[in-house]
Amino acid sequence: MPAPPRISPDPADWPTGLAERMEPLVRRVLAPNPSPYTLTGTETYIVGAGSDVAVIDPGPAGTGEAGHADTNGEGHVDAILTAIGEARLAAILCTHTHRDHSPAARELKARTGATIVGCAPLSIPDDGPRADSAFDADYVPDRVLADGERLSGDGWTLQAVATPGHTSNHLCYALVESGALFTGDHVMGWSTSVVSPPDGDMAAYMASLQKLQDREDRIYYPAHGDPVEKPRQLVRGMLGHRRQRERQILRVLEAGGAHAIPEFVAKMYKGLDPRLHGAAGRSVLAHLVDLERQGRVACSEDAWTIL
């Protein structure tokens, strides 16, 4: 099947609320929550073409909070149910519990009786500027899937692939019948993922990328951005990119002196949209925390030095 066209930068062209056929067992419905951190919005996937289906990443709740464009999913549950039609919703799966991914699971469950399955619940405070949607504190799964565990329906089988790093509870889901992998925010089709301490962990993120690099998935369907048709090539580039960022950090420190996070961002991300400085700073911090655990850098009063 030919690849779907790349997403237009013009919002008028975005297929919000429409079910797009990606392959015989997969449809995609775009939520109306665009933002600098979600691109055109959260992409919900419907898996199955028979008597029952599964939904992956049902998306944001219907009413967003002030200042959080990426939590506003008004009408999205209705669009998902329209796409499902007469089929039975067998399961609602979430890759992780940021507010642009899991809150709509509750309304879907209430309206269909389907079980919420997948990642473990997680809600923690974060003392840094949020670069992505905050955690969904009300997420309560009926069943948590362990790494490698499977869920099956009429003509489809989904297998959990544990990928901590972006969040500690992040799961991808492999569609056994077609070789597709639903990657949530771990691998996106438009940008690298934010790794934001304290829950985001750079060492775990790198290990999870290597785990995907060692797999042989045919295509990735991320929660934001285009499908990834050369997944191992992209993951190899992402691993290299993160290693390059680590080397940049060490070069800054090796030049001498103590440096705060904004100084790293200014030196490493020249020309970056100022709205994304918070995201860049969180990923720099994640690298520094990893280097600190390795005994290569130290922090005192929010300033970092080489050891």
Image: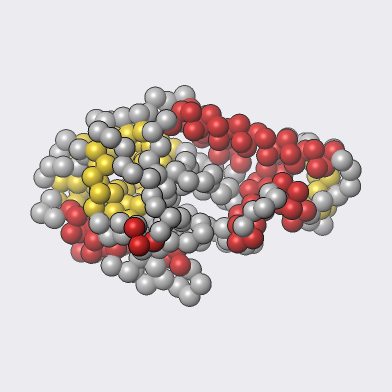
Is 256 situated left or right of 247 in this image?
right
Residue occupying image coordinates x 38% and y 45%: 6
Compared with 248, 91 (above or below) is: below
Dividing the picture into quadrants, the one containing residue 17 is: bottom left
Compared with 26, 230 (above or below) is: above
Is 255 situated left or right of 41 in this image?
right
Scheme by which the image is coloured: secondary structure
Nearer to the camera, 190 or 113 = 190
Image quadrant containing the C terminus: top right
Residue occupying image coordinates x 39% and y 52%: 8
- Asked if one can make out residue 172 in the rendered structure from this viewpoint, the answer is no
Residue 221 location in percent, x, y?
36, 41
- Asked if one can make out residue 203 in the rendered structure from this viewpoint, the answer is yes
Residue 269 location in percent, x, y?
68, 49
Q: How many marks are shown on the rendered structure?
A: 0
Residue 153 location in percent, x, y?
18, 40
Image quadrant containing the N terminus: top left
Is 270 situated left or right of 113 in this image?
right
Residue occupying image coordinates x 31% and y 42%: 4
Compared with 186, 240 (above or below) is: above
Residue 61 location in percent, x, y?
36, 66
Residue occupying image coordinates x 35% and y 52%: 43
Dividing the picture into quadrants, the one containing residue 294 is: top right
* Outermost residue toward the right in this view: 256
